[in-house]
Image: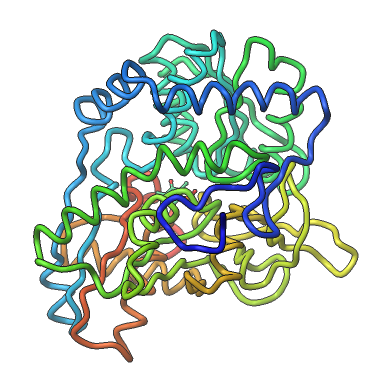
């Protein structure tokens, strides 16, 4: 089923996309994950479920998010640069798309609570928001380093009545937060649903999160054709776990003439521990119950991932991205901290849009590409807004 590229590359019956994905979990948990898969497959065909989700996406999130032609940047860089404005969603990023879906699914399964990890705090805020709206309890695990760095999001989660649990082990960032959230989940899955923050984790989570994010790509394809009369030449999105990118890409995988770039964070450099570019520098490995390209040392220990953008610093990456890399449908490239921060300022000052540092990676690659590519229609996924990063950027990277 995976020989052909289409908009619905689904995992095989064991949850694999080519060599990646799967379910490296206990038998007990497998049974629960089978129940989740079954509930999901039923829900997505159920008119009541679909209507409720679509109602919320439209009237609560504010979808469809527009596509904006960035004229000033386009003139400067000699390409037509368009932005898919996921930053305008309620809660300021694409993550609300899958959080609403996950919480609706949890509710449908009769769960009382959702549990999750968060890096930049964006997933935590989006999930806490969806849980508040739909009346479920919410526990969020977050590395202590990120709790410090992303204070406004921590405060938001607490106002929304989520229980924020700081994680003090290891590098005190996203990877450890996933570890601890998973341990807590295993103890409580009977009345709790894991609401993962990206297209990662054991099957069926990558498939479920992709489904809820595919609205980005299907909207974008239609909007782009409506605005320009044609498809984009190039589409670009940043890749952390890979949810905003897979959401956008899913609308265009069939369009062979659309060049696709996934941008990984190069952080401070190419050495182990300096970046979070899992596809570019990782080797096959298993983390958090699934197989993917994974940053690891020569002994196979999982490396600490680093990026200036907390939402990107995860040592693994979604299995479908690893597959799309293998079949060369998507080009995975890198952008470092400085290039991302420069793009952050560039978009702010040329277009009056302050992007998230994560999204700045995608834009930075469009600007970099413009050194060699001219007069193309480029669509960049602006996955989130930068309010959460303002204090940090001004402190660490003041514009001189
Ligand atoms: C979390 C986040 C990302 C990275 O996550 P993906 O799953 O790779 O999309 C990117 N941009 C923003 C704004 C985020 O909050």
Q: Position of residue 290 (x, y in %)?
A: 71, 46
Q: Position of residue 66 (x, y in %)?
A: 17, 49
Q: Quadrant of residue 225?
A: bottom left
Camera-nearest residue between 229 and 395: 229
Single out the residue that lies furthest toward the right.
Answer: 299
- Please report the residue visible at 48 percent of the width from the left and 21 percent of the height from the top: 105
Compared across the picture, whether 377 is left or right of 345 comes to: left
Single out the residue that lies furthest toward the bottom.
Answer: 372
- Please report the residue visible at 20 percent of the width from the left and 65 percent of the height from the top: 82
Camera-nearest residue between 211 and 396: 211
Compared across the picture, whether 308 is left or right of 14 comes to: left
Location of the C terminus (image quadrant):
bottom left
Location of the N terminus (image quadrant):
bottom right
Q: Position of residue 162 (x, y in %)?
A: 50, 18
- Tally of numbered discs: 0
Q: Position of residue 224 (x, y in %)?
A: 17, 60
Compared across the picture, whether 77 is left or right of 227 comes to: right
Camera-nearest residue between 140 and 111: 111
285 lies above or below 164: below
Q: Quadrant of residue 36?
A: top right
- Please report the residue visible at 36 percent of the width from the left and 19 percent of the height from the top: 49
Compared across the picture, whether 208 is left or right of 97 comes to: right
Q: How is the image coloured?
A: rainbow
Camera-nearest residue between 47 and 63: 47
């Amino acid at each position: 089923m995976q020989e052909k590229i289409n908009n619905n590359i689904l995992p095989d019956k064991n949850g694999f996309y080519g060599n990646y994905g799967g379910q490296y979990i206990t038998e007990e948990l497998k049974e629960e994950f089978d129940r989740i898969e079954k509930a999901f497959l039923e829900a997505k065909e159920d008119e009541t479920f679909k209507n409720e989700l679509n109602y919320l996406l439209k009237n609560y999130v504010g979808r469809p998010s527009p596509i904006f032609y960035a004229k000033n940047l386009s003139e400067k860089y000699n390409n037509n640069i368009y932005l898919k404005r996921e930053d305008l969603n309620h809660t300021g990023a694409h993550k609300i798309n899958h959080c609403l879906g996950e919480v609706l699914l949890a509710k449908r399964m009769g769960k009382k609570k959702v549990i999750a990890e968060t890096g930049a705090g964006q997933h935590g805020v989006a999930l806490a928001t969806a849980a508040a709206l739909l009346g479920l309890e919410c526990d969020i695990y977050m590395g202590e380093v990120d709790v410090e760095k992303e204070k406004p999001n921590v405060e938001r989660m607490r106002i929304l009545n989520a229980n924020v649990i700081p994680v003090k082990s290891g590098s005190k960032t996203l990877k450890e937060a996933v570890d601890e959230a998973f341990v807590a989940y295993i103890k409580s899955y009977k009345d709790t649903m894991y609401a993962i923050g990206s297209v990662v984790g054991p099957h069926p989570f990558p498939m479920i999160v992709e489904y809820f994010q595919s609205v980005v790509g299907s909207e974008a394809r239609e909007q782009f054709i409506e605005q320009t009369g044609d498809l984009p030449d190039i589409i670009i999105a940043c890749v952390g776990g890979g949810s905003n990118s897979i959401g956008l890409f899913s609308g265009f995988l069939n369009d062979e003439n659309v060049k696709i770039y996934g941008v990984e964070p190069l952080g401070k450099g190419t050495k182990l521990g300096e970046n979070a570019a899992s596809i570019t520098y990782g080797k096959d490995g298993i983390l958090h119950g699934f197989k993917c390209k994974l940053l690891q040392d020569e002994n196979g220990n999982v490396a600490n991932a680093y990026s200036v953008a907390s939402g990107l610093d995860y040592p693994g990456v979604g299995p479908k991205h690893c597959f799309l890399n293998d079949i060369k449908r998507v080009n995975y490239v890198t952008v470092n901290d400085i290039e991302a921060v420069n793009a952050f300022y560039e978009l702010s000052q040329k277009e009056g849009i302050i992007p998230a540092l994560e999204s700045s990676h995608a834009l930075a690659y469009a600007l970099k590409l413009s050194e060699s590519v001219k007069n193309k229609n480029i669509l960049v996924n602006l996955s989130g807004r930068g309010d959460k990063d303002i204090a940090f950027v001004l402190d660490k990277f003041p514009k001189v």
